[in-house]
Image (cartoon, rainbow, N blue to C red):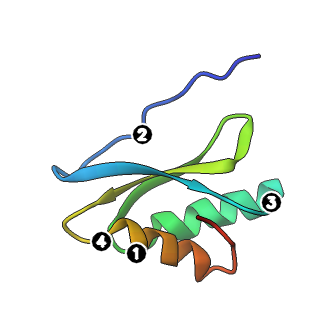
């Protein structure tokens, strides 16, 4: 079972990473759409699902631009339940 973790590029000096737990099963297209939408949100630098753990999203964001609550709200605004 290959579960290598890839480090996401962190461009901002004040970037931090959080893990979001997605409460519903998403298909591959839904996961890709979610990551794309998150990466387009203000302050979010990168987002990706954990390999083989499709209920976990690692998101990197600029803490000077947004808060962790803002990141969570951006996911919830896409009609995806997360915590």
Q: Where is residue 29 in the image (x, y as percent from the top left)?
A: 78, 60
Assign a secondary structure to mark 3: loop
Label pair 2/3, CB-CB below 8 angstroms: no
Q: Tell me which label, 1 or 2, sits earlier in the chain.
A: 2
| Image-quadrant location for residue 67 | bottom left
Label pair 3/1, CB-CB below 8 angstroms: no
Which of the labelled discs sits on residue 8, or is there none? 2
Q: Tell me which label, 2 or 3, sits earlier in the chain.
A: 2
Q: Distance between the residues labelled 4 and 2?
A: 18 Å
22 or 49: nearer the viewer: 22
Q: Position of residue 65 (x, y in %)?
A: 24, 71
Which mark lies nearer to you, 3 or 1? 1
Q: Tell me which label, 3 or 1, sits earlier in the chain.
A: 3
Q: Where is residue 34 in the image (x, y as percent from the top left)?
A: 64, 65
Q: Tell me which label, 4 or 2, sits earlier in the chain.
A: 2
Q: Distance between the residues labelled 3 and 1?
A: 21 Å
Q: Quadrant of the N terminus?
A: top right
> At 16% from the left edge and 49% from the top edge, which residue is drawn?
13
Label pair 4/2, CB-CB below 8 angstroms: no
Residue located beneath label 4 in the image? 66
Q: How far apart are marks 1 and 2 (CA)?
A: 20 Å
Q: In which quarter of the image is the C terminus?
A: bottom right
Which of the labelled discs sits on residue 70, or is there none? 1
Residue located beneath label 3 in the image? 26
Q: Tell me which label, 4 or 3, sits earlier in the chain.
A: 3
Mark 3 surroundings: few (<14), some (14-19) or many (≥20) residues within 10 A: some
Assign a secondary structure to mark 4: loop
Q: Distance between the residues labelled 4 and 3?
A: 25 Å
Q: In this view, does 8 lie to the left or right of 52?
A: left
Q: In this view, does 25 lie to the left or right of 20?
A: right
């Amino acid at each position: 079972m290959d579960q290598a973790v890839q480090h996401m590029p962190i461009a901002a000096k004040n970037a931090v990473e959080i893990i979001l737990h997605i409460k519903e099963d998403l298909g591959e297209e839904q996961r890709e759409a979610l990551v794309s939408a998150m990466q387009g949100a203000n302050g979010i630098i990168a987002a990706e699902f954990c390999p083989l753990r499709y209920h976990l999203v690692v998101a990197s964001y600029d803490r000077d631009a947004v808060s962790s609550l803002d990141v969570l709200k951006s996911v919830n605004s896409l009609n995806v339940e997360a915590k």
